Amino acid sequence: MEEIVKTLPQHTSSWSKGRLTYCMYEGFWMTKRFHEGVTNLAQQSYKAQPNDVFLCSSPKTGTTWLKALALAIVTRNKFDESNSPLLRTTPHDFLRHLEVDPKQSEENQKNSFFPLVATHLPYALMPKSFVTSNCKIVYIYRNIKDVVVSHYHFEREKIKLSVEDAPFEEAFHEFCQASLERPGTILFLKYEDLKRDPMSHVKTLVEFLGYPFTREEENAGVIENVINLCSFKNLSNLEVNKTGSFLALNTMVENRTFFWKATDGDWENYFTDEMKEKIDKLIYQKMSGTGLIL
Ligand code: A3P
């Protein structure tokens, strides 16, 4: 594996004081560990099943939230807010994450009857069976400026650098440097919409997943319970998410790093006018015509 990585274009980020190295694989920048996950996965020739539901996201766009919501929805006949596995396990450890855990941890092996599989892989790198199986896809996305800030803090915490030692400005410039047709089977969820109006978007998600709420459940407040259980306030205050950690790609990751502020527009506290202009230009170049510009 090391040999393959050596042949790929590499970039060691200066803002991280050399602690983060990325390689370019098939046109995408990724950490070496992530690359390992991607190629392990290809070697394992993962077979997507028609009943699978893929939870797709770029890192820092609301993956943890979407995983928690989907899990609470499909397991609600088994668990409720008093005994949900979310109270003691991070959603990342409970759900299978394709490229991180191609072999499956013990915890999610037990749960492999759930149809949910999460991934950060771009469409072009997904296993062939995913493209041909016509399985359902939920794709969550978020204002890229907040993603940049979220990403910065996540990586900074991971490599244990303070804000003073890892200036946002450098991270921003590096981020900039780096730069459908399946009717009824893709749901695009916007993080900001989900925050603004969780009720109607969770209902859409529930219908899409094929687990609609019954009238009795609606009357009994089950939707509100799912939303509250998975809320940032609730999840980020659970002991497991304050002090626990989980193994991803042979590295222990602290659960708390998935919960920062969960606010919209925090980017305004970090971006200068110049940075805003620069990223707006990039977004326009890359995304115009996709309908996904926020
Ligand atoms: P911030 O860094 O802006 O606070 P991901 O799960 O894709 O890694 O994304 C992490 C971002 O989602 C972080 O954003 C985190 O605080 C936020 N987040 C985590 N759990 C959430 C929840 N239950 N509801 C809303 N946002 C959540």
Image (cartoon, rainbow, N blue to C red):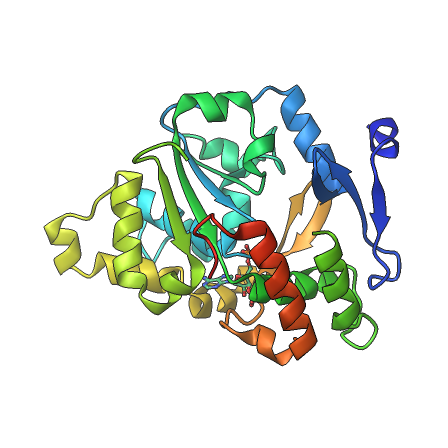
Q: Residue at x 34, y 35 (%)?
A: 185
Q: Residue at x 50, y 72 (%)?
A: 263
Quarter residue 169 falls in: bottom right
Q: Is residue 57 left or right of residue 216?
A: right
x, y percent for residue 48: 47, 24
Q: Is residue 150 visible?
A: no
Q: Is residue 191 visible?
A: yes
x, y percent for residue 110: 47, 33
Quarter residue 126 falls in: top right
x, y percent for residue 281: 62, 62
Q: Residue at x 58, y 58 (%)?
A: 283
Quarter residue 268 falls in: bottom right
* In this view, 63 is above or below 151: above
Q: Residue at x 58, y 60 (%)?
A: 258
* In this view, 57 is above or below 238: above
Q: How many marks overall?
A: 0
* In this view, 180 is above or below 194: above
- Taking depth in this image into account, of 181 and 167 the one nearest to the observer is 181
- Taking depth in this image into account, of 166 and 131 the one nearest to the observer is 131
